[in-house]
Image (cartoon, rainbow, N blue to C red):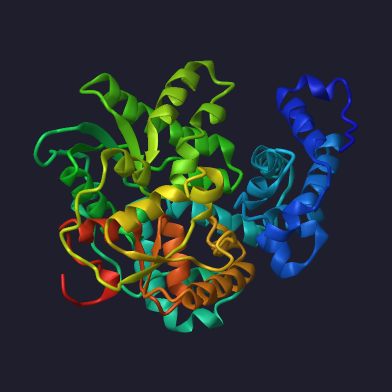
Amino acid sequence: METRFTTTSLLDPDIAAANDILRKCVHCGFCTATCPSYVILGDELDSPRGRIWQIKEMLETGEPAPAATVKHVDRCLSCLSCMTTCPSGVDYLRLVDQARGHIEQSFRRPLSERLLRSLIAHLVPRPRLFRLALAGAWLVRPIAALLPGRLGALVALAPARLQGPSPAATPQVFAALGQRRKRVALLTGCAQQVLGAAINEATVRLLRRHGCEVVISPAGCCGALDFHLGREDQARARARRAIAAWTAELEGAGLDAVVINASGCGSTVKDYGHMFRDDEAWRGRAERIAGLALDVSELLLELGLEKPAVPQPDLTVAYHDACSLQHAQKLSAPPRQLLRAAGFELREVPEGHLCCGSAGTYNMLQPELAGRLGRRKAANLETSGGAVVAVGNLGCLVQISQHSALPVVHTVELLDWATGGPRPRAMGPGNG
């Protein structure tokens, strides 16, 4: 693609990087077939190719972002399916992140939009406050359809039942069961402490059973949510707190890995080196932590899964590939290998490359499009013939649960059950 940046603007390293990315795009169109927003809308401007053109125009002028460009960039899920498909190696992730940062700095959104984004940014990373907000939302769920704008969709996402605070979220150290093989820090997340506490509890049991001493440090939010919203400064502030907490453990008793069981968070932590590329004070520590970051499936595959303690004859599992695992982290095989090793029969899902519509904050900010994608994903999961859905990311679990009648559980909950833990609650009562 031809670009027309001025010599002066190219002195900005971010613009120079964007220029290099843009010039790799040959507008071949392979990305359109795998882009969820283009598949459901059929609008060229809602394809990666169309967005790349709009971002180029916006960055070349250096002017405030046009409203039309904002609309189409906002509709991007950042699922990165286009990057998996692209034969030219276009780094769409860096480009769309830069576009979101430019939009956040230069475009004044309508008041209702600003309030909604501020509400999400304020509540979700604070587990206690988020829990209170969800309790309030639960009370008004029966009239969610009557609420104005996206507020009704936001309330509809609140679960019917909330667990109390989990002991696995409190800073502490869980000893390995048997001989210690590794010492690892577990990111317990922010929303996951409230919406998926059982995931962290299953992860702790599973890691301890496999010889890991598990450290729960006061890392807090990794910064992913703020980054989704284009709030780069806030994202870095949260990331610094996480890096500082893990660095203290690393330089104290030591760490073999930072383990993450929410793949959206994992993609962010693994990218800390890039996030702090221009920060001399933090770059070294950020790169060090990013180098230790592992999805829980990567670590378990390295350790080798214990022989299943609870045989699961004929239990079929539809495995859903979270975009942040399959496209961002390139981890499609490890979860499948572990589930098969645990004795589960896997069923492949049609259109497995398409996003479920969760995409960080997407189902809160773009509920209509997210709903269409969620219903499409649910239909494909049910077509697969699986009796239960396994996922590797909390956002996907919440989104799919809203649209599918199948029980939806995190992969670690099934692995924990198979190796001696409790049956996942979402599967209801049964043997084992």
Question: Is residue 114 in view from this perspective?
Answer: yes
Q: Residue at x 35, y 60 (%)?
A: 410
Query: Could you say where residue 115 lies in the image, as x and y percent from the top left?
Result: 58, 57
| Horizontal and vertical percent position of residue 305 | 25, 48
| Residue lying at 44% horizontally and 42% vertically, measured from the top left | 266
The image quadrant of residue 184 is top left
Q: Is residue 289 left or right of residue 245?
A: right
Q: Residue furthest left?
A: 178
User: As displayed, is residue 158 above or below residue 168?
Assistant: below
Q: Is residue 94 left or right of residue 341?
A: right
Q: Quick check: can you spot residue 193?
A: no
- On-image quarter of the N terminus: top right
How many tags in the picture? Answer: 0
Picture residue at 56% right of the left edge, 35% below the top: 233
Extreme-top residue of the structure: 280
Q: Nearer the viewer, residue 28 or 96?
A: 28
**Residue drawn at (69%, 62%) of the image:** 37
The image quarter containing residue 60 is top right
Q: Nearer the viewer, residue 406 or 28?
A: 28
Q: Is residue 93 above or below residue 372?
A: above
* The C terminus lies in quadrant: bottom left
Q: Position of residue 148 (x, y in %)?
A: 59, 75
Left or right of 248, for residue 78: right
Instruction: Return the x and y of residue 331 as percentages of the image width and height.
Output: 47, 46
